[in-house]
Image (spheres, rainbow, N blue to C red):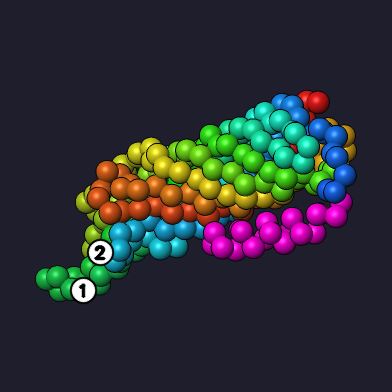
Amino acid sequence: MFKRMGAALAAALLFVGPAAATPQAPIWTGFYLGAHGGGGWGDLKDSNEGFEDVNGGLGGIHGGYQWQSGNVVFGAEGDISFGKLDDQIEFINRGNFGGRPFTETTRFGFEVDRLASLRARIGYAAGPLHIFATGGVAWAWTELSFFDSLTIGGRTFVSDDEKVSDTQVGYTVGAGLEYKFLQNVSGRVDVQHYGFRDAFDIDDVDLNLTIVRGGLTFHFN
């Protein structure tokens, strides 16, 4: 994934190179605030097994401050996103006990309902086009659930229904591009990879997510 990000940035830099040969006005300096939305995928597992198909959508807000010096743009950004990235594993066991058929249902679930990050950014501007890389600390609000029930003769008995919530702390790295189609408004597309080690304080259980987002940003400059 990181090789693909680097290749995309290199191709974009080659494309904007001729346009950036002349000195650039600092149109990217200042505070900014925006909204974004998108989707992602990932997994929560150790080296052998776990939730391998975590996916879903989310949306949120981002903001920060950046400085432009020539063609170089650098700054800091924070964001928070809400939504649902989840996966579920279900086991159904059917049999007969004392002449009466039964069905036992066991369900394990995992969910991410918020993501946040605080990141440094550095980029290259060619007029209204801005290509950037970013990285920093990230947080994920997660939940593990366990449900077990037994159905006999049309009656269902729930034997267990538990949920455990936890906040994971890890890192995020990514890259993207922005384009100012108005003096104070830009559109952006970015890709962020999130990594959280020893999730739920369990050794060697890692949460990895990749999020693709699009958004609009208002610049106060």
Q: Nearer the viewer, residue 203 or 128?
A: 128
Q: Which residues are magenta?
A: 1-19
Quarter that holds the C terminus: top right
Pointer 1 residue: 95
Identify the secondary structure beneath mark 2.
strand
Residue 167, quarter of the rendered image: top left
Tell me the tag on residue 104.
2
Residue 158 percent across, percent down from the top left? 26, 51
Q: Is residue 61 visible?
A: no
Quarter that holds the N terminus: bottom right
Q: Nearer the viewer, residue 49 or 103?
A: 49
Under mark 1, the amino acid is Gly
Q: Nearer the viewer, residue 15 or 158?
A: 15
Residue 42 percent across, percent down from the top left? 47, 58
| Residue drawn at (14%, 70%) of the image | 97
Magenta stretch secondary structure, dominant? helix
Identify the secondary structure beneath mark 1.
strand
Q: Is residue 128 visible?
A: yes
Residue 146 percent across, percent down from the top left? 29, 51
| Residue drawn at (60%, 63%) of the image | 4
| Residue drawn at (78%, 25%) of the image | 220
Tell me the tag on residue 41.
none
Residue 6 percent across, percent down from the top left? 61, 59
